[in-house]
Amino acid sequence: MVLADPGAVLTSPLALPAGALLILAAATKSAQLPFTFWLPGAMVAMTPISAYLHAATMVKAGIYLLMRFTPIYVPSVAWSAVLVPLGLATAVVGAVLALREHDLKAMLAHSTVSQLGLLTAAIGVGTSYALSAAVLHTFAHALFKATLFMLVGIIDKEAGSRDVRELGGLWKVMPVTAALTGVAALSMAGAPPLLGFVSKENLYEGFLEADFAPGAGPVAAAVAVVASALTFAYSARIVHGAFGGRLTQPGLYEPSWAFLAPAAVAALLGLVLGPAVRVLNPLTDRAARDLDPGSEPVTFVLWPGFGTALVLSVLTVAAGLALFHWRGRVDRELERLPVPDGAAVFDRIRAGVLDLGARVGRPDTDPSPAAVLVRPVLALPVLAVVAWVALPAPAPFPGPVTRPLDWVVVVLVAATVAGAVTTRSVTAALALTGFGGLATALWLLLAGAPDVAMTLLLVEVLTTVVAVLVLRGRGVRLRRPARWRRVPAAVAAVAAGLSLGAATYVLTGRRAPSPVGGYLLDTAEAATGGTNVVNTILVDFRGMDTFGEAVVVGAAALGLLVLIRRGEAGADASPRQRVATDGPADTIVMRVASRVLAPLMLLMSLFLLWRGHDEPGGGFISSLVGGVAIVFLRLAHRGDAWALRLRPEPLVGSGLLLSLLTGIAVYPLGLPFLTPVYLPGGVLLSSFVFDLGIYLMVVGLIVAATDRIGGRARTGSVLGSSE
């Protein structure tokens, strides 16, 4: 959509900021100045990974991004005026740093930076010829750089070193490796008749077309010659340093063809495709047309005849040979050059950000609830005042505001809150807080949201269970804070409550009905076969979103479970041993009640699961009911309770797998994810099975939570008794 109308993009006032951000993104991804330091730092990876990282798509993602957006921004002089100098400067700096190195892999890493700079500069020129040459050089670079990285890995493995000062004469014991390295290095140096020679010459032709400033073309081509001459010099150093001179490690031998074959394929392709470069013309033409549909096709050949590009190639080879011949003097001069340590700057910035984060988050690590709550509580009245001053007056309500039953709920909630903040009993505080949640659920039910009300009701029950598990074995009385702390806390709490009340008054019920909501209400049953619009949104209209959220939660849960079981000393204990602890739940009343209530609750959960597509219910609500039943059984401590033998990992894993298979089962039919599938007789199957997967995942998380918290509560009770 963005590329379909370039004119609309350039006329936007956001065109320049967007272009600047695109260049910044590409520069960081493709290691352009001043972000060149990370790519050589990544050379510590294994050789196949380095070959992929430097030769294939990893670092070229920024190059691809620039290519895709060049048709939009190339009419702007600023685009070329930034990219061409940036790319050429990166090319020269990368080549200089490569020539300073003695580590073969470090040379190649800095070489990648230099070659990416040439590509960036060619893209900045923006002509059809320059873009086609950039595509061709991208292909050539992939071949010779992959070859060289794999062969350097072989040298490192065989010789035990990558330092050219410790190597020499390896061609006598590794002739095939030497030949393949020489072919790839010649292609990188731009020597005929290899593919790198063809792509380099056409890059020169492309640079000569730069016209964003007077004399830009010749200057760009001259700088490219400097970078390419340095490339020729370090390419010669790679070959001579490893394979030339006197043999220093005579005990080495040629590796097997299994190691050499991948590098040989890439090296020979670079050799063959130089004379046969015409076979790549359809590829480069297609890429150029994708970038600019009106571009003229460019025909690449090995020998286009005498011209400026050939003269520049001769100068490149001559300068490269001179740099290599006087390499001792060149090395001494290069060692004197100051080289900014970008990695150190990045580390200092990172350390500063981490220190800032630690300072900002320090109150949240305080064990006192007041330290955690003070900022968000105080922020509410501040935001309310700002909104009152900055925003226009609220629109009038379109209809009645409240009903008598609403005020009854308000009174109940206010009474429970007042009791919860004044009581010193832990049990009373838990009961009052839970009752406040139940009153809010009643309010939602009166508002016509039974699904949300049921969810809140069940969450309140589970929250109370978790609180009981956490607080079991600890003190039963809350400490009364000092008066000097009570008054400010009360003022802040009242101000925050009034702010939220004012926000609710201003923002609720003053908008016209949502068009999206109206569409869902009108089409849900016809499109999905379900009459419960909330459930159809979750499992049909937003099925992929629901599945993605479930995958994130499920994967995190599985990972944490594995880490917890490994880290705990009692990891080999059975669920029964971890959960079964002495406490008030282990009574005859609880045991008898669990025999009666738990089976009924499980049946109710399955009923809610089945009817969820048409009536209030669904996978999440039914799983909460089932989870409460299982928690009830586990808290009752019945020795024969099957709930004590449940493990969360199979539940979460099977739920994830079931939901995934349900969603993709329709792909062979050419249908989108989670398209409704019906059994004979009109019984909806797919949504039910998808909800069943959600059911298993949530139940598994509840089992994991009670298992984990129950074990921690037991440990805490022991510690508390010792104190």
Image (tube, rainbow, N blue to C red):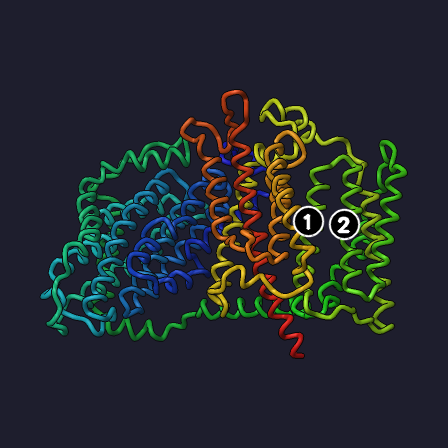
Q: Is residue 261 left or right of residue 68?
A: left
Q: Give residue 19's position: percent from left, percent from top.
A: 53, 46
Question: What amino acid type is highlighted by mark number 1?
Answer: Val
The residue positioned 61% from the left and 69% from the top of the image is: 358
Total marks placed? 2
Question: What amino acid type is highlighted by mark number 2?
Answer: Gly
Q: Is residue 79 left or right of residue 477?
A: left
The residue positioned 10% from the left and 65% from the top of the image is: 173
Relative vertical location of residue 560 with respect to residue 334 in this rendering, above or below: above
Q: Give residue 218's position: percent from left, percent from top.
A: 36, 50
**Helix, strand or loop for disc 1:** helix
Residue closer to the observer: 302 or 240: 240
The residue at the far bottom in this view is 723
**Residue neighbourhood size for the residue with mark 2, other residues' Cα within 10 Å, grouped as few (<14), some (14–19), many (≥20):** many
Tag 2 residue: 437
| Quadrant in the picture for residue 616 | top right
Residue 194 visible in the picture? no
**Helix, strand or loop for disc 2:** helix
**Residue neighbourhood size for the residue with mark 1, other residues' Cα within 10 Å, grouped as few (<14), some (14–19), many (≥20):** some
The Cα–Cα distance between marks 1 and 2, rounded to whole angstroms, is 9 Å
| Quadrant in the picture for residue 467 | bottom right
The residue positioned 85% from the left and 45% from the top of the image is: 409
| Quadrant in the picture for residue 30 | bottom left
Q: Give residue 316's position: percent from left, percent from top.
A: 25, 56
Instruction: Determine which of the numbered discs, if any, sits on residue 459 in the image.
Output: 1
The residue at the far top in this view is 681
Q: Are marks 1 and 2 in contact (CB under 8 Å)?
A: yes
Residue closer to the observer: 679 or 383: 679
Q: Give residue 112's position: percent from left, percent from top.
A: 34, 57
